[in-house]
């Protein structure tokens, strides 16, 4: 597919998202991803955008998974790192959220140092983003000290009123969709990607997928326990 068509699909996804048509946005971003085999950056942007659409649809695991794919493809993608941190915070996984914020702060500090000799709108933007990241980190630390447990219901995408049968169905669906062996299924290796880089990308994808899969198992173990469900 021509680059112009890929850009059109991404733009169509953005337009659908702004119009609140989130499932349509997901379809467009997915089509753009399937059509792209050359640009890691383009795929990273589409994954990050699709993550926002999934989050708007209440599909937090899908949103986290897409952010992880975006970060694996572009380790310096600050928006994807920031976005994944906020999604982890939603499910009250404060440890992972804090890890991402530390990574974001380190990245922004590096970018600021690289551009400090040339004050501009870019450096102002980096400094503003860095200040926000530090404030978020302080807020996150306060929330973490409250000792709240993971939001198991949000992880599985169900309501607290759901039955044990519904919980089991949600678990099976999530476990199948997010099995580590399926992670990165949209990715096609381009000839211009070195073996070392591709190995790093696939290792990062597997690591993040393993973590998400364990979260799903933990949520199911907790919610399928009648003593927990009754609380």
Image (cartoon, grey):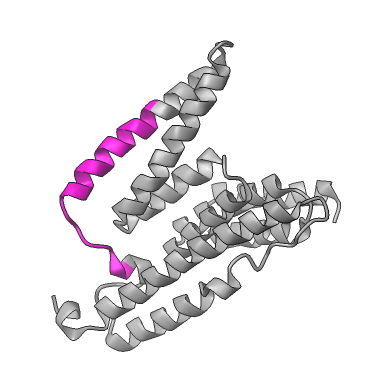
Residue lying furthest bottom: 165
Q: Is residue 213 magenta?
A: no
Magenta span of residues: 131-153
Name, please, the residue furthest toward the front. 196
Q: Residue at x 85, y 56 (%)?
A: 1
The answer to whether residue 58 of the structure is visible from this angle is no
Task: Give the image location of residue 140, x and y in percent.
Answer: 27, 43
Using the image as rendered, state which of residue 206 and residue 3 is in the foreground.
206
Magenta stretch secondary structure, dominant: helix
In the rendered view, tell whether residue 142 sits above or below residue 181. Answer: above
Residue plotted at (44% across, 71% down): 213
> Which residue is at 39% across, 71% downward?
214
**Would residue 106 be visible to someone looking at this image?**
yes
Q: Where in the figure is residue 85, as x and y percent of width and height?
A: 40, 48
Q: Is residue 69 left or right of residue 165?
A: right
The image shows residue 43 at horizontal and vertical percentages of 67, 52
Q: Is residue 114 above or below residue 201?
A: above
Q: How many marks?
A: 0
Q: Which image quarter is the C terminus in?
A: bottom left
**Residue 76 in the image: above or below residue 228:** above
Query: In this view of the protein, which residue sits in the foreground, 201 or 78?
Result: 201
């Amino acid at each position: 597919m021509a680059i112009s068509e890929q850009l059109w699909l991404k733009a169509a996804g953005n337009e659908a998202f702004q119009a609140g048509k989130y499932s349509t946005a997901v379809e467009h971003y997915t089509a753009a991803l399937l059509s792209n085999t050359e640009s890691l950056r383009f795929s990273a942007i589409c994954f990050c955008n699709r993550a926002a659409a999934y989050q708007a649809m209440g599909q937090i695991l899908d949103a986290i998974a897409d952010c992880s794919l975006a970060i694996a493809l572009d380790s310096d993608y600050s928006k994807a790192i920031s976005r994944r941190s906020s999604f982890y915070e939603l499910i009250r996984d404060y440890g992972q959220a804090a890890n991402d914020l530390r990574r974001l702060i380190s990245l922004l500090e590096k970018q600021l140092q690289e551009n400090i000799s040339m004050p501009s709108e870019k450096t102002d933007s980096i400094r503003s983003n860095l200040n926000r990241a530090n404030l978020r980190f302080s807020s996150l630390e306060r929330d973490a000290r409250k000792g709240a447990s993971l939001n198991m219901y949000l992880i599985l995408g169900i309501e607290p009123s759901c039955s044990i049968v519904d919980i089991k169905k949600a678990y099976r669906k999530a476990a199948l969709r997010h099995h580590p062996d399926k992670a990165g299924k949209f990715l096609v290796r381009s000839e211009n990607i070195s073996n070392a880089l591709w190995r790093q990308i696939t290792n990062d994808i597997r690591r993040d997928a393993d973590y998400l899969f364990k979260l799903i198992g933990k949520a199911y173990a907790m919610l399928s326990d009648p003593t927990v469900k009754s609380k």
